[in-house]
Amino acid sequence: MLLGDGYLYDSLRLQYGNISSIHLLGKVNYAQVYKYYSIADVFIMPTIEDNWSLVVPEAMACGLPVATSIYNGCYPELVKKDLNGMVFDTFNMHTIIDTLASFHKHDLKAMGEESKKIEANFSAKQCAQRVYEAVIKGLK
């Protein structure tokens, strides 16, 4: 299932639109995205440029194992190899295949639970607490 309507959407639809196991859904209203998280087994974000992708912790909060590219700035904090997800190089097909295959060797439910635990450290409350502690430390 592919959500979004980036510049590759039309070519992907032409190339893969007739394959019954591939669902190209196009642009989805943000208020409806949670429904797709709830039916997914894993979440994959193959970005080639992202400072800190917010969809990755969103998916983690919904209990999904995640995979994202080395070009996503959030992976060092959020993706723990084999614990809650995988990291791959979007430009290296072998790393993508290895990442997808690795999910078949893991307990996806357990990985999703780990995702929730890791993501909880990045809630608004937790982030505000870290900023507060940094300010207090700076004042001392």
Image (spheres, grey):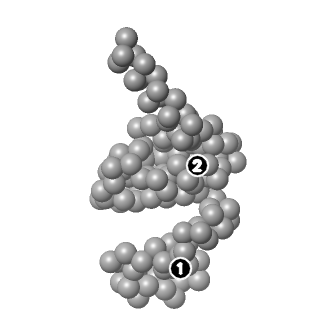
Q: Are marks 2 and 1 in contact (CB under 8 Å)?
A: no
SS class, disc 1: strand
Across and down, in percent, residue 38 comes to 68, 62
Location of mark 2 (residue): 60
Q: Work out whether 118 lies above or below 99.
A: above
Q: Are there few (<14), some (14-19), or many (20+) residues within 10 Å of tag 2?
A: many
SS class, disc 2: helix
Across and down, in percent, residue 12 comes to 40, 80
- Disc 1 marks which amino acid? Leu
Labelled disc at residue 77: none
Asked if residue 42 lies left or right of residue 100, the reply is right
Q: Work out whether 18 lies above or below 36.
A: below
Residue at coordinates 42% horizontally, 43% vertically from top-left? 75
Q: Quadrant of residue 140 in the image? A: top left
Q: Quick one: 105 or 83, which is closer to the camera?
A: 83
- Choose the circle earlier in sequence order: 2 or 1: 1
